[in-house]
Image: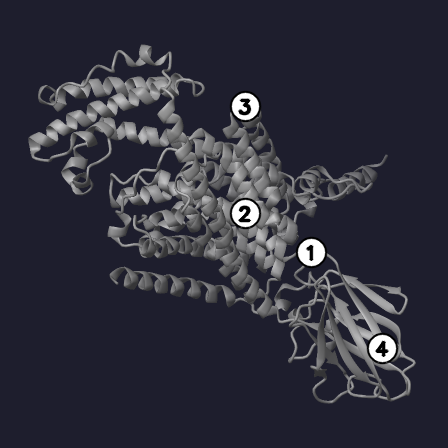
Amino acid sequence: MKNIKTLIFQSLTGLCIFSALLICLAMPGTCWAAFGEDMEKPKPEFTRQGDKIIAKLIPRGKSTRVNIEFEVLGGKLTDVKGMDFALAERPEVDVKNFNSSLFTIEIGNVSPPGGEVKVSVTSQFFTSSTKYYVFNEKLEKQQWMKPEVHNLSLPNLVRQIVIEVKDGGTFDSDGVADGKIFFVGGPRDSFWGYALGTLFIRFFGIFIVLGVLMIGMLISGKIFQSLEKNVEGTVEPPVSPAAPQTVKPVAVPAPEASSAPAATSEAEIAAAAATALALRMTAEDQSCEDEITAAIMTALHLHLFGQRNSAETDGYSQTAEAAETGKPAETELHSKPFVQGASGWVQQGRGRIMESRLQSFNRK
Amino acid sequence: MSWDQVLELIKSILITQTGIPNLVFKEVIMMCIGLFFIYLAVAKEYEPLLLVPIGFGIFIVNFPLTPLMGFSEHGNPELIRFFYKYGVEWEIIPCVIFLGLGAMTDFGPLIANPKTLIVGAGAQLGVFITYIGTLFVGFTLKEAASVGIIGGADGPTTIYLTAKLAPHLLGANALAAYSYMAMVPLIQPPIMRLMTTPEQRRIKMRQLRPVSKREKIYFPLIGSTLIILLIPAVAPLMGMFLFGNFMRECGVVKRLSDTAQNALMNTVTIFLGLSVGATMQAEVFLSWKPMLIFGFGLLDFIVCTFGGILTVHIMNLFIKEKMNPLIGSAGVSAVPMAARVTHSEGLKADPDNWLIMHAMGPNLAGVIGSASAAGMFIAMFQ
């Protein structure tokens, strides 16, 4: 419970700090115009294929081209052009929501004049939440309109938006029932909905990816460990031919606990540690790895024996197994005097070993 | 030739062929900025391998009339433009650097404790928070993603993603990323202390199990299979990274591994640094956006550190063997600086608490996490 309380407190403190930072950073400018040029402005190119007109463009927030197909049922699709959003910019709309430009669609041969046509706009880029907003600058109020559209799902993740437009109706910018329709509008998606939605999905996506990798590594780790155990069980441990020559001088049998005072082992520890360091400094590759390991082990072994003796003398107990393996006994973790008793050589040696291991990660 | 003609000729030479009369105030400011980064690299040793070429790139490209970053009359790229076009614009150098980094990396600590991968994922929090923050101040989606990745604290990933999504921000993003990576020892400790109690900082972690050679050899194969299957867009970065690591671990191509770690890495670092520095010309760089990028970069690092530590706290609620929350801060990549900072903070709390190898796990997980975040963004904008 205490942990959870601390965690909540820490989380809230952290959140407050970076919220404050975020607000400070957000102060200088909160509009797109602050940065001048609209670098992601879509620039559609149009081609005609029979009754269809296809717009090719790179939408906002995308790096690849998409196709948007325009088709009309009940009239003839005369032309489709791109329109600069600045001409239709009003306080009630935000350019960020119009990812794929505004289009002016010209339709002729509406029969009978004053009749209704169906405009279909098809693309793989649309989603089920894509709307189609219509603009009519000749209207005095509500120049931007949100018509009822049919958002249909087609095969291969393609979606089709169908809008009904009446000749001379509110969506017809020429305003007269003359058999011609001038229709301005564009597909609209929620910018913030997309940004926040993807943020959430992709952040947790990283957890999923790394989680899958973690599971893969845990499983493979178990398999490899069991394989290694089997190999160790059947094969004699190899003996390095160079090892005896180097280790022999220092790998003397450990003195009996009663006859090895800590003071006398200091010199041996020093000798072993010096051997390890000399080997490390002279080795140009990893050929002396075994010798270095042996020398370090000897130094640690001697040190731990010496330390056990002094600990016993001081009243601190440690098991012989812990001394042999170098694995600290449970009581050691909390016994400060024991830790402080580590000799300078050992501290130095451990520091150097860790530093040496770190070299392999050092990118400098 | 009369004296008047001689003087006119000299005047013409001075005006059209020397830089002095063409030098403008903005360029002088940029040169000072270049010199400042050179100073940081040389005197303070802040990421000198990158900041020296970047600083020098900024310095020389801002001299007037220099044929460095433009195109010749025949349309051929000039010297540094050439490096930039084929190295950065074609997205080759960041991937080659990842190859070298892979060859330099020992994944042992991560293989020994795969749980730390989750810490690396949590430390990407700042990337996404900054992404939203930058959208609020008017950055476009692609720009926001390229700024967000700064918090991943991985230079090549930042450069790779920015070159792909918002090349006009390359200089500012790269400079912010490398500057803050160098400043990790200054940025992280206060957050680490704020986010942990003294008892938590003293938590000792069990020594990592030894990792066999065989495991290390198989890791790049397993890792690349899983990651690239899930995020194909990250294949150029992770593929090269794990290929480099495979060369290192398989042990039969020592010459190739050595070249990737040293000669190749050093060569591309020079061209990368100069190219990135040279993108920072006065007319491009001296605007609001780079200033904001530096601000958001700092926020990004702070939140990433926060996210890493918070992830460890949350994990500790569920796992039996508690982890020292300090290792969470190493999840921001910045290998091995972030791990060193964790280690030194651990030593401050308890002089016998050696956290370096435990911190290397999240540190390496952070590299994979930030590359994955970059892959996610690339996929998002495809």
Residue shown at 72%/84% (left/top)?
A: A143
Q: Residues within 10 Å of mark 4 (few under 14, many from 20)?
A: some
Q: Are marks 1 and 4 in contact (CB under 8 Å)?
A: no
Chain containing mark 2: B
Q: Name the image quarter holding residue A50.
A: bottom right
**Is disc 2 in the same subunit as disc 4?**
no
Q: Amino acid at mark 2?
A: Ala
**Residue labelled with disc 1:** A63
Q: Quadrant of the N terminus of chain B?
A: top right
Q: Give residue B252's mark.
A: 3
| Dot placed on the residue nearer the N-terminal end, 1 or 4 | 1
A307 shown above or below A5: above
What is the C-alpha distance between the residues marked 2 and 4? 48 Å
Q: Give residue B371's mark.
A: 2
Nearer to me, B31 or B382: B382
**Residue labelled with disc 4:** A73
**Is disc 1 in the same subunit as disc 4?**
yes
Q: Residues within 10 Å of mark 3 (few under 14, many from 20)?
A: few
What is the C-alpha distance between the residues marked 1 and 4? 32 Å
Q: Name the image quarter holding residue A118.
A: bottom right
